[in-house]
Image (cartoon, helix red, strand yellow):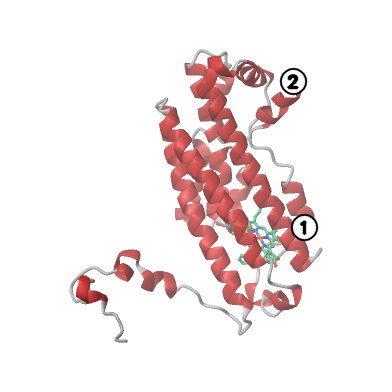
Amino acid sequence: MTTYDPSSEGAQMSFDGRMSYGDYLQLDAILDAQCPLSDAQDEMLFIIQHQTSELWMKLAISELSAARAAMAQDALQPAFKMLSRVARIMEQLNSAWDVLRTMTPSDYTRFREALGQSSGFQSWQYRLIEYAAGNRNAAMLRPHAHRPDILAKLEAELARPSLYDEALRVAARAGFDVPASILDRDFTQPWAESDAVMQVWATVYRAPEENWALYELAEKLVDFEDYFRRWRFNHVTTVERVIGLKRGTGGTGGVPYLRRMLEVELFPELWRVRTTL
Ligand code: HEM
Ligand SMILES: N[C@@H](CC(=O)c1ccccc1NC=O)C(=O)O
């Protein structure tokens, strides 16, 4: 039997002067960017795991920003579509832990020292997602002081209304009683829990048929936070499995720090309201 030649049905085989797959995707840049610092087999896994996570985070940031812009125009249906995509991206990030979990403490100690003081704590895209969602802690800017370009992106994000701020602006335009002190708050500050906001969500959840768009928006936000919590939980569990209670390379206490971060709440009133329904 002769081997099949797909050019017989028209497959393009010559890319002299034409844009190819690798050209379009800039694969040279991407595939040249894995540079292990040790000869440990698992370092490649570690690098690719982080690089792919950062690529998914890049897409999540783009979708979150577009969702927020759509919400500002009261275009809730397009915003829902984008928020659903963000949830799927977060599922992707959550499933990725299954690959990293195959790395044992013995594997990791073979290259951990090579990482120096670098750490996911310095992931600016992760901070941007936290800021965009509404977890605003200006202290997290400091590791980026040496990179004015990144600092500027984070500071700009800190100054804009968060996803949660934007949701409450939607509610205010829909006629709900959202206090001006919340609508005009200093966005760089952490969210302060509010009874008035609780009341807004209570009204929405008590009569979903009458407030369907806001009801759906609230559930999209809860979904987002649900996936985010799962990511944090997977992270801390993997970290404990791999380094136990050692301090982090980023300088924090490690697992105790990450456990503390499990308590972060992005949309506190949306969780609190459930008890009252
Ligand atoms: C064996 C794998 C991993 C270990 C041992 C580990 C360990 C740690 C530790 C100890 C911290 C606390 C900061 C510090 O002092 O270093 C941290 C933070 C962080 N790591 Fe990892 N990590 C791992 C994998 C990952 C992966 C795959 C990602 C995905 C990008 C990631 C992203 C982050 C982020 C974003 C933070 C900051 C969390 C926060 O401040 O809330 N880590 N990690
Ligand atoms: N903080 C980790 C090191 C680490 O995980 C890391 C190092 C460099 C780049 C990304 C990392 N991932 C997440 O924190 C540790 O203490 O072992």
Mark 1 vs 2: CB contact within 8 A? no
Of all residues, the one furthest to the bottom in this rendering is 1
- Disc 2 is placed on an element classified as helix
Image-based side of 31 in relation to 92, left or right: left
**Is residue 86 placed above or below 215 in the rendered structure?**
below
| Cβ at disc 2 under 8 Å from ligand 1 | no
Residue 238's image quarter? bottom right
**Is residue 270 placed above or below 249 in the rendered structure?**
above
Ligand 2 positioned in quadrant? bottom right
Front residue of 45/179: it is: 45
| Cβ at disc 1 under 8 Å from ligand 1 | yes
Q: Is residue 192 visible?
A: no
Is disc 1 surrounded by few (<14), some (14 to 19) or many (20+) residues within 10 Å? many
- Disc 1 is placed on an element classified as helix
Front residue of 53/258: it is: 53
Q: Which mark is residue 255?
A: 1
Q: Nearer the viewer, mark 1 or mark 2?
A: 2
Of the residues shown, which amino acid type is indicated by label 2?
Thr
Of the residues shown, which amino acid type is indicated by label 1?
Val
Front residue of 25/158: it is: 25
Give the number of marks. Answer: 2
Q: Residue at x 62, y 49 (%)?
A: 140
Q: Residue at x 58, y 29 (%)?
A: 218
Residue 245 x %, y %: 81, 63
Of all residues, the one furthest to the right in this rendering is 245
Residue 25 x %, y %: 35, 65
Image-based side of 268 in relation to 245, left or right: left
State the residue position of label 2.
276
**Is residue 179 placed above or below 57 in the rendered structure?**
above
Residue 100 x %, y %: 65, 66
